[in-house]
């Protein structure tokens, strides 16, 4: 089964080389075909599980905590200027 | 053909919390770039969010203020999209189980009471702020993770004016409830406008046009008016509208296309595995419900009805809630509450302005206003003396009765004592006395004034008038 | 030979003053120096920092202080944030990233006095079962360096099995602790979901990930779990359940303990040597007084499909933050989108790309219900299977892996085959259980075999009790690979 990767690849913002694309498409197609086996199960009336533990109402008080210094905040940034994280110009 | 507009608004409001939604960084405007940030709100590898209890509380409070239901189950979802100001490249929000649903907002429009239904108010997080330079952009993440309430209306709005009045009403409700400062200058309120037109009588909606990221209410009104006219014109010229997102250019006063449905986002929402659901308990909700304040419009209407106040007075008490509460306290049990309103507005408010103090600083209890009114009505003091007594109440906090007692301001009603004053006045002013005897009634007022003066205002004016007439008419 | 010691042996000598933490730490560093060129368990080691911590521990001890792990060197998988140390997740994409904060488990280790050192090799972003998906080259199995050590916590298993550290931490999303522990012949424990804080653990699949210990014996696993378990206000999924005394559970007594053998685990592809070794281990437990009975987990055959939908979907969002804006190795582009695309294209390895794309696909418009929502429902059925089984038994026993370690490169072209080898370990994460792998034999080729025990949520005491009793009755855990 070949899968049309283009939309997912675009959404995931991953540039693939043509070779990668050629390898990935059939591999993922095979995995998708494998997971089709779930369609053989009747899941009507079954609640979905999003968490492996049944907690609720976990909150913290509205108490301030120390923030990072600007230097520490920016220490891993590829590019900075004037205390900002610099990115290629955003055009919209 | 006649057309009608169908408008729905999505309003984003920053909540008034001390800290951000998921971390302890300050929720504060105007700090140096990237100083109110930590590993959590910068989206560093390995971090996890923990919800701010106060943000959840303010959300439920908003629900009550907007006449919404607060469901017994709410959950968090991830909305996936890449943008440089979005630290995790997913935004935490509430998709199908929001914290509050189905309410309404009432407001006045052209003298009529209008209502817009609220579909939902859900909690999410704000993103960072981008700055654009000649050849690059820069991002400050101080705003990233600030709690943001998205309030979504049903498509009940039919004009730019109505949108404008709805927004003003919403803003005053949120300010009144202490939910948000709604400071437009600081970007604390932003609005997306969904707008379509259809021939009157047609059931199905026209193609929906979205105008993103409006940051002024007047802008929303102008954009809506422009867009309604534009869409009708397109249809009348036989054109087709397509579902799209448009941008409002405030300077030019026009909208222009940003993107069409074809390149719409696919947000791939799914339940956030890092955050557990919220199941508000009855006790938690009751505690919040107790904090629900009366909304401005309802308060105005009630004050007018209950105390028979004119709209002007009611407006003053809505605009200054503390003063209004004080008035209601003072008016308790009074036959004529309007008098209390006069004292509170004409005297008390003026004094507060003059001394730059507030109701909270007052030294005397509200009940003293009623006592003061009682003294005037009972004839113990004149309304002129009452002014003096009030000034002393304000300065010392003493009760009106004590002030009158201490200062000997009690009205002189002893007819013997008054008669002496009257005879003195007649003797000292034979001219006016004769004038009165000769039928010039007005001359009595002069003599009355002399008696009041001589008694330093303490004489009972009504008795003085009667006594003078009696003596002169001999 | 200090590096061969277990935690409890080392602590005994440290407490007796026979040995210093500096000597123990230096011994580990020397061992790394000597063998790691062949094993590649460590991505990096900051010896200066490690020795400074050791000296501080020695000073504390000299001042009369004693802590549960004072002076014990523990090595860390490269997926846990350690302040001022590199954090790469064995990926190129993080570039020179240096963490400004400590993960909660690291804070807890420091509070217990441990010497936290090294960045252990792994499959990139914990995605893999062989440690071949590392940007820093594969880690190798110390029992046969042509073979994989398992994954994703390959380096964590190798470092313990080869005595390059006293103990280590790894993470387990679908078997990433238990599987490499089995293939390298050490003890690996995956705690119940919510037992150990995930704050500072770089997320692969948030609803499945847990941090856990790799140790040389079960007593050490109890000690290390004791240190890292417990509530954390920075992790909303952390369960505020009291932490029991795990060492107290090591009574050696398994009489009356009920152990279930799932009927559905007799799968095709189960290696006969592995089957023989684990059957023998179960017999041993029975001989010690445990009751063994067959049970059924009817939805077993759906576990792998369910796992690969849920895990990849969560990962596709979790890994979106690696795009070159705030950190990492950026490749320039004309606009942010192009910069993101190139950065991610060059920075992620192939398995990570495969999983992100798969996860994006199953969440995308039109597919969500068919894949993701359905998988979440099947997850409910799988969890119910286990909860039902645990009404009848206290523990579930099985092989940890269907085969011993395979050769490096043997399965790289066939991701699905690789996924299918996770059959015994994956359900535990889907159901939020705890699990342990303990050594239970060797293949004729001399490769270790692991016995897996699964326990109910927060059933770690039973798990440790049975594993310990078995271990005491056998000597598999004392075997060491020959690296001289």
Image (tube, grey):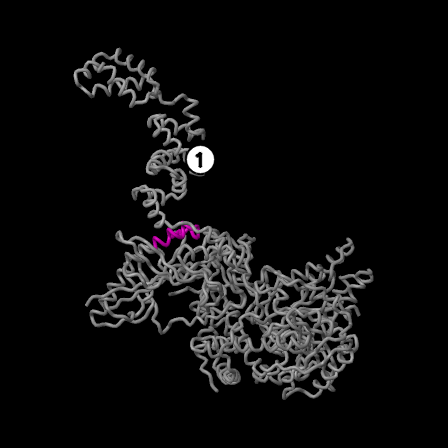
- The part of the image, by quadrant, that contains residue C483 is bottom right
Q: In the image, C44: left or right of C251? A: left
Query: Residue C463, percent across and down?
Result: 70, 72
Foreground residue, B254 or B57?
B57
The magenta segment is: B167-184
Q: Which residue is mark 1?
A: B365
Q: How many marks?
A: 1
Question: Crowdedness of circle 1 by 10 Å Cα count: few (<14), some, many (20+)?
Answer: some
Look at the image and say whether residue B182 sits in the magenta stretch. Answer: yes
Query: Residue C125, percent across and down?
Result: 58, 72
Visible residue check, residue A32: no
- The part of the image, by quadrant, that contains residue C190 is bottom right
At 24% from the left and 21% from the top, the residue drawn is: B445
Visible residue check, residue B437: yes
Relative to C300, say whether B369 is above or below: above
Foreground residue, B394 or C123?
B394
At 58% from the left and 60% from the top, the residue drawn is: C234
Query: Residue C265, percent across and down?
Result: 64, 84
| Residue at the left extreme, as displayed | B438
């Amino acid at each position: 089964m070949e899968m049309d990767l283009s939309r997912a690849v675009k959404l995931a913002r991953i540039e693939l080389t043509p070779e990668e694309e050629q390898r990935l498409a059939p591999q993922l197609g095979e995995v998708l075909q494998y997971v089709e086996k779930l369609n053989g199960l009747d899941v009507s009336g079954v609640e979905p599980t999003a968490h492996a533990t049944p907690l609720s109402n976990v909150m913290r008080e509205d108490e301030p905590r120390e923030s990072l210094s600007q230097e520490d905040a920016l220490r891993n940034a590829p590019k900075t200027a004037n205390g900002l994280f610099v990115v290629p110009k955003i055009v919209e | 053909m006649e057309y009608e507009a169908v408008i729905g608004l999505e309003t984003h409001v920053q909540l008034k919390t001390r800290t951000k939604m998921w971390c302890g960084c300050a929720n504060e405007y105007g700090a140096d770039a990237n100083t109110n940030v930590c590993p959590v709100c910068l989206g560093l590898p390995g971090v996890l969010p923990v919800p701010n209890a106060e943000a959840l509380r303010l959300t439920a409070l908003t629900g009550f203020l907007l006449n919404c239901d607060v469901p017994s189950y709410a959950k968090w979802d991830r909305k996936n999209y890449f943008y440089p100001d979005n630290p995790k490249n997913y935004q935490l929000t509430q998709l199908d189980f929001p914290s509050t649903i189905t309410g309404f907002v009432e407001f006045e429009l052209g003298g009529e009471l209008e209502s817009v239904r609220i579909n939902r108010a859900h909690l999410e997080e704000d993103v960072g702020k981008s700055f654009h330079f000649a050849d690059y952009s820069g991002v400050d993440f101080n705003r990233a993770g600030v709690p943001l309430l998205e309030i979504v209306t049903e498509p009940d709005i039919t004009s730019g004016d109505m949108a404008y009045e709805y927004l003003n009403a919403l803003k005053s409700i949120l300010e009144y409830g202490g939910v948000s400062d709604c400071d437009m200058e600081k970007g604390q309120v932003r609005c997306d406008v969904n707008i379509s037109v259809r021939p009157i009588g047609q059931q199905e909606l026209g193609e929906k046009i979205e105008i993103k990221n409006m940051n002024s209410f007047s802008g929303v009104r102008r954009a809506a008016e422009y867009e309604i006219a534009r869409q009708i014109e397109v249809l009348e010229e036989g054109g087709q509208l397509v579902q799209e997102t448009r941008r409002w250019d405030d300077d030019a006063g026009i909208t222009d296309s940003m993107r069409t449905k074809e390149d719409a986002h696919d947000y791939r929402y799914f339940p956030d595995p890092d955050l557990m659901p919220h199941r508000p308990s009855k006790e938690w909700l009751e505690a919040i419900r107790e904090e629900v304040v009366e909304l401005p419009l309802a308060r105005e209407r009630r004050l007018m009805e209950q105390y028979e106040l004119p709209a002007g007075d009611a407006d003053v008490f809505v605009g200054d809630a503390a003063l209004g509460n004080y008035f209601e306290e003072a008016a308790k049990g009074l036959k004529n509450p309007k008098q209390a309103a006069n004292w509170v507005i004409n005297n008390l408010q003026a004094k507060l302005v003059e001394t730059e103090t507030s109701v909270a600083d007052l030294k005397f209890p509200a009940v003293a206003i009623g006592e003061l009114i009682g003294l005037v009505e009972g004839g113990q003091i004149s309304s002129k003396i009452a002014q003096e007594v009030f000034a002393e109440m304000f300065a010392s906090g003493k009760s009106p009765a004590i002030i009158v007692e201490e200062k000997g301001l009690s009205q002189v009603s002893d007819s013997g004592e008054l008669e002496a004053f009257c005879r003195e006045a007649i003797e000292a002013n034979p001219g006016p006395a004769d004038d009165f005897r000769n039928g010039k009634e007005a001359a009595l007022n002069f003599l009355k004034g002399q008696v009041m003066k001589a008694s330093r205002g303490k004489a009972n004016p009504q008795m003085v008038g009667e006594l003078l007439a009696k003596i002169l008419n001999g | 030979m200090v590096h061969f010691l277990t935690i409890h042996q080392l602590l005994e000598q440290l407490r007796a003053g026979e040995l210093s933490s500096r000597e123990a730490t230096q011994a580990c560093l020397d061992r790394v120096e000597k063998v790691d060129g062949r094993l590649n368990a460590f991505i990096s080691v900051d010896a200066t920092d490690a020795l400074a911590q050791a000296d501080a521990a020695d000073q504390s001890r000299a001042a009369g202080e004693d802590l549960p792990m004072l002076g014990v060197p523990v090595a860390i998988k490269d997926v846990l944030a350690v302040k001022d140390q590199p954090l790469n997740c064995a990926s190129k994409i993080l570039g020179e990233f240096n963490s400004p904060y400590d993960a909660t488990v690291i804070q807890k280790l420091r509070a217990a006095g441990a010497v936290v050192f090294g960045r252990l090799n792994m499959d990139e972003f914990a995605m893999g079962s062989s440690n071949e998906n590392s940007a820093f080259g594969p880690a190798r199995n110390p029992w046969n360096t042509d073979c994989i050590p398992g994954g994703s916590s390959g380096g964590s298993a190798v470092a313990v099995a080869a005595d390059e550290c006293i103990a280590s931490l790894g993470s387990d999303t679908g078997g990433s602790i238990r599987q490499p522990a089995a293939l390298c012949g050490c003890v690996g424990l995956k705690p119940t979901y919510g037992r150990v804080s995930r704050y500072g653990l770089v997320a692969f699949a948030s609803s499945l990930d847990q941090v856990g210990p790799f140790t040389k014996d079960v007593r050490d696993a109890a000690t290390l779990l004791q240190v890292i378990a417990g509530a954390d206000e920075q992790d909303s999924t952390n369960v505020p359940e009291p932490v029991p005394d795990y060492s107290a559970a090591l009574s050696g007594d398994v009489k009356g303990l009920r152990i279930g053998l799932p009927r559905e685990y007799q799968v095709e592809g189960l290696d006969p040597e592995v089957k023989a070794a684990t059957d023998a281990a179960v017999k041993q437990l029975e001989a010690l007084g445990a009751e063994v009975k067959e049970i059924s987990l009817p939805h077993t055959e759906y576990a792998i499909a369910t796992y690969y939908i849920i895990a990849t979907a969560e990962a596709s969002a979790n890994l979106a933050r690696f795009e070159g804006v705030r950190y990492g190795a950026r490749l320039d582009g004309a606009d942010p989108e192009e910069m993101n695309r190139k950065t991610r294209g060059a920075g992620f390895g192939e398995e990570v790309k495969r999983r992100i794309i798969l996860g994006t696909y199953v969440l995308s418009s039109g597919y969500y219900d068919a894949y993701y929502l359905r998988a979440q429902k099947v997850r409910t059925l799988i969890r119910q299977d286990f909860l039902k089984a645990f009404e009848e038994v206290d523990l579930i026993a099985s092989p940890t892996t269907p085969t011993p370690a395979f050769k490096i490169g043997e399965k790289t072209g066939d991701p699905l085959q690789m996924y299918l080898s996770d059959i015994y370990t994956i359900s535990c994460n889907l159901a939020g259980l705890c699990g342990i792998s303990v050594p239970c034999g060797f293949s004729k080729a001399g490769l270790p075999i692991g016995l897996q025990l699964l326990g109910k949520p927060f059933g770690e005491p039973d798990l440790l009790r049975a594993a310990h009793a078995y271990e005491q009755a056998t000597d598999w855990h004392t075997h060491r690979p020959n690296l001289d």
